[in-house]
């Protein structure tokens, strides 16, 4: 299935921060592929995911659990870091909260929080 979605990243190395912007229809495979590539490249302690322009309706709960398990296995290098997700739509926010719960169950080596506004996420990240 082709998606019209994109996942792009900007690195603010002075803040040890990766800004990830997600837009359009995104699948679980898109997220898994991006995550694996990210952990093979430049890594920062903190990540801010702006998912306010994304459609995550194709992603199922069991897929989120699988993504959390994969990330937990490959993300030890970010131990002590933080990941913030920003969603402004109810469905996407719910998906984000579900991923946050799965992250806690997987004992992710970094903190995960879900927000409705970028400003709140930046404040929590300390950037």
Image (cartoon, rainbow, N blue to C red):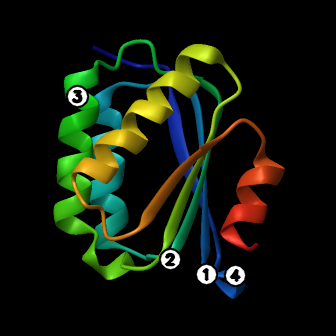
Residue 72 higher or lower than 64, as above or below: below
Residue 121's x, y, as percent?
Answer: 71, 54
- Between discs 2 and 3, the one toward the N terminus: 2
The residues tagged by marks 4 and 3 sit, at their Cα atoms, a distance apart of 31 Å
Which disc, if any, is residue 15? 4
Examine the rendering and report whether any part of residue 79 can be seen: yes
What residue sits right under mark 3 in the picture?
63
From the viewer's side, name the closer residue of 59 and 40.
Answer: 59
Query: Residue 16, labelled with which disc?
Result: 1
Estimate the x, y position of residue 64 in percent, counting from the top left: 28, 33
Asked if the residues shown at circle 1 and circle 2 are in contact, with their CB atoms under 8 angstroms apart, the answer is: yes
> Relative to residue 76, is residue 113 drawn left or right?
right
Whether the residues at callouts 3 and 1 have beta carbons within 8 Å, the answer is: no
- Identified at 52% across, 67% down, the residue is 82
Q: Is residue 31 left or right of residue 86?
A: left
User: How many residues crowd mark 3 within 10 Å: few (<14), some (14–19), many (20+)?
Assistant: some
- Residue beneath disc 2: 44
What residue lies at 31% left-to-right and 59% top-to-bottom? Answer: 37
The answer for how far apart the CA atoms under marks 4 and 2 are is: 9 Å
Q: Secondary structure at mark 1?
A: loop
Mark 4 secondary-structure assignment:
helix
Q: Is residue 26 above or below residue 39?
A: above
């Amino acid at each position: 299935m082709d998606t019209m979605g994109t996942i792009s990243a900007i690195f603010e190395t002075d803040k040890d921060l990766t800004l990830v912007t997600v837009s359009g229809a995104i699948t679980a495979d898109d997220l898994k592929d991006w995550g694996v590539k990210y952990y093979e490249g430049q890594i920062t302690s903190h990540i801010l995911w702006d998912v306010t322009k994304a459609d995550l309706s194709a992603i199922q709960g069991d897929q989120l659990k699988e993504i959390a398990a994969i990330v937990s296995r490959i993300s030890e290098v970010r131990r002590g870091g933080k990941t913030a997700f920003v969603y402004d739509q109810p469905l996407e926010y719910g998906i984000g909260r579900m991923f946050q719960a799965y992250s806690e169950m997987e004992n992710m080596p970094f903190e995960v929080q879900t927000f409705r506004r970028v400003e709140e996420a930046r404040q929590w990240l300390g950037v």
